[in-house]
Amino acid sequence: MSGVVNKSDTNYLDKIDQWITNNQEVILAFNRSLVSIPSQNRYPTGEEKEVQQLVEKTLKELGCETDVFLPTDVPGLTAHPAYLGERFYEDRPNVVGTKKGTGNGKSIIFSGHMDTVPEGDDPWSVDPYAGEIKDGRQYGLGLFDMKGGMAASMMALKLLNELGIRLKGDVIIESVVDEEYGGANGTLACRLRGYEADIAIVPEPSNMIVCPAAQGGSMFRIKFQGRAGRSFSGEKLLNPVYPAARFIEIFRQFEENRSQAIPNSKYYKLNPGLPTYIQGLKAGPINLPLCDRVPSECTLDVWFQCYPGTTEEELREEFEAFIMEKSKEDELLKMMPPKVQKLIRFLPGTSIPENHGILDVVKEVSEESKEELLIDGAPFACDSFMFNMYSNTPAIIWGPKGGNAHAPDEFIYVDDYKKLIKMYALTIIKWCGVEK
């Protein structure tokens, strides 16, 4: 019984460390099992069903009551103001597991998504579905964003179960579909389904930084319309690629300008700037093997972020004012002006109150485990706003350390990942309380 915590024992750290050491292969094998199942978001559809079946099986083995439902099974979802239309949910179930506590404790939700971005055409140096371990890293499509973070929450609960630690408060682990591409309908569906707690942890890839705030963001398509063809008969052609090329320099200036924005929140002490990207560039008929004419249009897909407190209207107005001011003296851009089209929902930036009790718990966990935990705002947007704006559950972001999110050779650092499981377990203990 040396691996079990006695009811009178309040020093859990050594037993937790020993459990993680003894179960390292179990932990990494579970990660492998998740990444071995493709669950790519094929906007507006997706292929999450099989991996969600594994999640449901795992949650049942952890003693959770499970709830499996399509987002569109939830009454009121499609009429909700935060619902993003033109998404399809056949065979894309949410899975929620609830481990009931003994009572009189605070509750916690771990909420994350099982969909990944598509693998894409860029080559990997390892198999994206093998969960290979090399040089202290474990690789896999979606492992950093964010199967690893969700797996860590399940391993933390497994750890507590096997150490015989009985919690007072409930632990809810919800695995949602369709978060990528601004989805978040799966997360909204859980809120409308009635899943609430005293705090939520969203295990997005924060590199172990505890994030009480997240940035917001918008995606737009910038279109330039020309006149297509070849001038065999003296036709006057307008090549939209040329004004697009001029616009790229203007957008680079916009990116530089935003990198110097001053944060309006104490949660952004590290001041990461506001990420601003050109994410796609298209001209000509992409379904043809060769293009033999001037294209009729050229488009750029762009993404840029904002700090909490900025509205969608304010963000778009700032962008359009900047590009129009820079474009007005350019003859090509006057002839073929940029047209701005919204592509996906605006993801609002949000934050929790600065005095929220979860931050005190995190500091205790950091001190007790002797692991430095920074507290700062997340330099990305995600679905955490669904908690902070549309539920009674405040949410923080806190997930693994790794790299190459949305890119080839996505990975997590194994040693830091084990620390994350330990700190999740300690956080659950301190937040939910333990039955003596």
Image: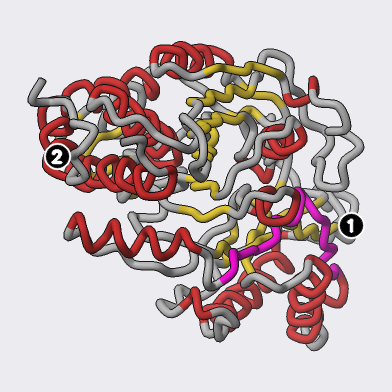
Q: What's the magenta region?
A: 336-353
Whether 331 is drawn above or below 167: the answer is: below
> Residue at 51% of width from left, 45% of height from top?
106
> Residue at 19% of width from left, 55% of height from top?
369
Identify the disc placed on residue 202.
none
Query: Which residue lies under the disc numbered 1?
Result: 234
Which quarter of the picture shows residue 310? bottom right
Given residues 180 and 432, the one toward you in this image is 432
Judge left or right: residue 382 versus residue 78. Answer: left
Residue 321 pos. (x, y %): 80, 81
Which quarter of the picture shows residue 115? top right
Residue 84 pos. (x, y %): 80, 41
> Magenta includes 333?
no
State the scheme by which the image is colored: secondary structure
Visible in this render: residue 355?
A: yes
Query: Which residue lies under the disc numbered 2?
Result: 17
Judge left or right: residue 198 versus residue 329. Answer: left
Spatial CA distance of label 1 from label 2 is 77 Å
Judge left or right: residue 20 versus residue 48. Answer: left
Q: Amino acid at mark 1?
A: Gly
Residue 411 pos. (x, y %): 30, 40
Whether 55 is drawn above or below 308: the answer is: above
Given residues 170 and 121, the one toward you in this image is 170
Is the C terminus in the top left, top right, bottom left or bottom right quadrant? top left
Judge left or right: residue 14 versus residue 324. Answer: left
Visible in this render: residue 127?
A: no
> Magenta includes 347?
yes
> Residue at 77% of width from left, 35% of height from top?
192
Q: Amino acid at mark 2?
A: Asp
Given residues 91 and 233, the one toward you in this image is 91
Residues packed near mark 1 inside 10 Å, few (<14), some (14 to 19) or many (20 plus): few
Residue 193 pos. (x, y %): 74, 30
